[in-house]
Amino acid sequence: MAQSRLEKVGTIYSRLTSLIKSRAIPEENKPIWLDLYKTFPPKYEPTFSRPASGPPVKKIFYAEDLIRAQFHKHHRRYSSVNLLDNKSVSRTESFILIYRQLEKDGVPQDEIYNKAIEEFLEKFKHEQALKEAEKADTAAESSQRPLQGLSIKRLVADKEGKFGKKLAQEAREESKELTEEEKKMYKPIRLSLEKIMEDKETTKEVKKPE
C-alpha cells in the first residue's frame, strides 16, 4: 500500500517511489527525472520543513508602473487599448508622456498627478472634438458628392439600365452647381455615364425586331 502522499510528509521522491511500489503508477510510466534523481541526488533533501535558501525574490516594479496603476484605478474608462492600431499612441501612454513632461518642468510631486490628469482630459476632449468634426465633414462631403465613389463597373453590369439613367441625370444636374475646378474633376465620370447610356440605347435599338 502506498505511503502518505501529503506534501508535508516525505519528499517528492519518496512519494513517487511509494506509488510505483504499490503499483499505483506502472513502472513504464515513471517520469524521466526519477532516474536522474537516483543518479544525481540533491545535496539537501527538498522537504517541506526545510526553509528556502537564497535571497528573497525582489518585486520588479518601475516608477512608470505605479503611475499606470494609479491612472487605471481612477480613470478605468480611458485605459482600453486597441491592439490592432500600432500607429497611434494609447491613452495611457499619452498620460505618461504628459506626466514625464511635468516632471521635467519641475512641478511639485504632490501636484504633478492632478495637473497631468487635467492636461490629459483637456487633450482628450480636444481630440474627440476633432474626430467629430472630421466625421461631420466626411458625411457632408459624401452627401454633396454622390458621384465621388461611383462604380462604373456596376453601371456596366446593369443590363436593364434601371439605375444608369437616374445617375446620369443626377450628374448633369449637379454639374450645374459645381465650380470650375470641381467640373474638371467630375467631368470624366459624367462623360463615362453618358457614354454608357448611349451604348445601352444603341444596343437596345439594334436588338429591336424589324
Image (cartoon, helix red, strand yellow):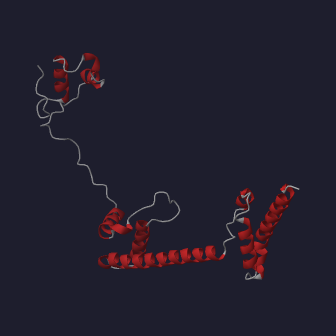
Q: Nearer the viewer, residue 81 or 204?
A: 204
Give left or right: position of 173 versus 39.
right
Coordinates of residue 129 in the picture (x, y in percent): 49, 78
Coordinates of residue 170 in the picture (x, y in percent): 71, 74
Give left or right: position of 148 versus 194.
left
Name the quarter where the C terminus is drawn. bottom right
Q: Is residue 105 above or below residue 74?
A: below
Q: Residue at x 12, y 35 (%)?
A: 8
Give left or right: position of 7 versus 100.
left
Q: Is residue 124 above or below residue 25?
A: below
The image shows a total of numbered marks equal to 0
Coordinates of residue 87 in the picture (x, y in percent): 53, 62
* Residue 184 quadrant: bottom right
Name the quarter where the N terminus is drawn. top left
* Residue 166 quadrant: bottom right
Farthest residue in the right direction?
Answer: 210
Q: Is residue 4 above or below residue 82?
A: above
Coordinates of residue 75 in the picture (x, y in percent): 33, 70
Q: Is residue 109 above or below residue 91?
A: below
* Residue 108 quadrant: bottom left
Q: Residue at x 82, y 59 (%)?
A: 204
Q: Residue at x 34, y 77 (%)?
A: 112
Q: Residue at x 25, y 16 (%)?
A: 27
Q: Nearer the viewer, residue 120 or 111?
A: 120
